[in-house]
Amino acid sequence: MNARDATTRRIDLTMHRPWFALYGGVKPTLVIGGRGQPVQWGLGTWQVPADETVVLGVFLFNRMWRFGQAEFALEPDHAPALVYRAPALPFLRGRIRLLESARHRGD
């Protein structure tokens, strides 16, 4: 175990797609620290630095353009649970927020 391992924490990000959307078969991409990675809808867990502000970004791509973009600056004192909500229309922005139950825990 090196010093870098000791200064990380795990965060949960739940990806929600709308129940009705004017696009299909689109999967989200998560960007952490400038590095993008394809992800699945639902709950996922990632490791980020514990003592730094980390900018998380999400976007959707439908082979022609990017849409549903959202960013969130996760501070070290924020709860480690976030929710992304994708837009119903393929030209709108998405939203990333702290998970309500985690926001009130007082961790």
Image: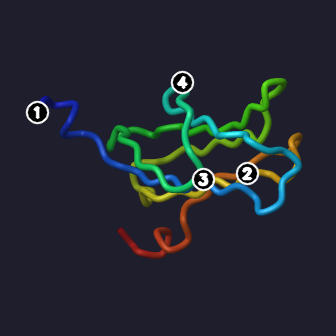
- Residue corresponding to mark 3: 15
Position of residue 65 measured from the top left corner of the image (x, y, whole percent): 82, 26
3D distance between C-alphas at marks 1 and 3: 31 Å
Position of residue 26 measured from the top left corner of the image (x, y, whole percent): 72, 40
> In the rendered structure, which amino acid carries the disc numbered 1?
Met
> In the rendered structure, which amino acid carries the disc numbered 2?
Ala
**Which label sits on residue 86?**
2
Tell which circle, 1 or 3, labels the residue nearer the N-terminal end.
Answer: 1
6 to the left or right of 58: left
- How many other residues sit within 10 Å of disc 1, few (<14), some (14-19) or many (≥20)? few
- Residue corresponding to mark 1: 1
| Dot in front, 1 or 2 | 2
Front residue of 98/64: it is 64
The quadrant in which the N terminus is found is: top left
Residue at the outermost front position: 25
Front residue of 81/22: it is 22
Position of residue 107 measured from the top left corner of the image (x, y, whole percent): 35, 68
Q: Quadrant of residue 7?
A: top left
Residue ID at (20%, 35%): 5
Label 4 sits on a secondary structure element that is loop
- How many other residues sit within 10 Å of disc 4, few (<14), some (14-19) or many (≥20)? few
52 to the left or right of 26: left
